[in-house]
Amino acid sequence: MIITPEILLDMKFTNEQVCEILDRLAAEYPEATCALDHKDVWQLLVCVTLSAQTTDVSVNKVSPALFRKYPTVQALADADPHDVEEIIHTIGMYRTKSKNIVSQAGMLVDMFGGIVPEDDEELQKLPGVGVKTANVVMADGFGHQRIAVDTHVFRVSNRIGLVKAGDVAKTEAGLKKCLPHDRLTEAHHEMIFHGRNCCTARNPKCAECCLSDICKKTGIPKGKK
């Protein structure tokens, strides 16, 4: 049988191959974990909200000063968004994010007693919180298994061939079906690290990739030759 690119894209990984992909990524990036500096669930929520369309490195540069001035949920709820802007002005969309995190803190105080809710739907009621942010907080804040699809996870999972989806929602649904449930959070961090370090948007380092022989873009899954 001649393996054409079209046939290759239609092939599905076996459960064993999926686990091998995760095992290789785990070996390649043993340090893969949440890159946002935080001390508790609330700080994580704020940092993830700030990280939209901005690098984690940029957020980590402004968050220490932010939490020094506003060390509690109540303090941030009482803040003037314009004062918050002065602290986070170096990150993208800082005006909108300033309003969001102040309003977010106010809602946490008014509706949840100043405590971040351990619930996906409740989290998404907060300003600036969508599905991705809620997934990260549930995973890294509360220890639940979640796959948050950011630009790296979307790109890497579709390139590898774990999913074949045109948008974030379908990618998340596809990954939930093919990945072991107890490795969702792990996969999220490993694909982010792989996307940053190897499977970049432009000029991916396919020759150096630990998945080059199994990736749907560059190789043929084992057992399918």
Image (cartoon, helix red, strand yellow):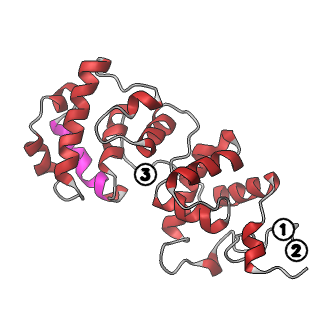
Question: Image point 72% across, 70% down: which residue?
Answer: 9
**In screen coordinates, is 11 left or right of 66?**
right
Q: Secondary structure at mark 3?
A: loop
C-alpha distance separating marks 3 and 2 = 38 Å
Q: Nearer the viewer, residue 45 or 149?
A: 149
Magenta stretch: give its range.
Answer: 58-69
**On residue 89, which mark appears?**
none
Q: Secondary structure at mark 2?
A: loop
Q: Nearer the viewer, mark 2 or mark 1?
A: 2
Determine if the magenta segment contains residue 61.
yes
Q: Say above or below: 163 vs 183.
A: below
Type of amino acid under label 3: Ala
C-alpha distance separating marks 1 and 3 = 33 Å
Question: Image point 81% across, 54% down: which residue?
Answer: 16
Picture quadrant where residue 3 is located: bottom right
Type of amino acid under label 2: Lys
x%, y% of residue 40?
A: 37, 33
Q: Secondary structure at mark 1?
A: loop
x%, y% of residue 170?
A: 57, 52
Residue that mark 1 sits on: 222
Which quadrant holds the C terminus?
bottom right
Badge 3 or badge 2: first in the primary sequence:
3
Question: Image point 46% across, 31% down: which residue?
Answer: 120
Mark 3 nearby-residue class (10 Å; few <14, some 14–19, many ≥20) = some
Residue that mark 3 sits on: 35
Residue that mark 2 sits on: 225
**In screen coordinates, is 168 left or right of 51?**
right
Q: Nearer the viewer, mark 1 or mark 3?
A: 1
Determine if the magenta segment contains residue 198.
no
x%, y% of residue 200?
A: 50, 72
Q: Nearer the viewer, mark 3 or mark 2?
A: 2
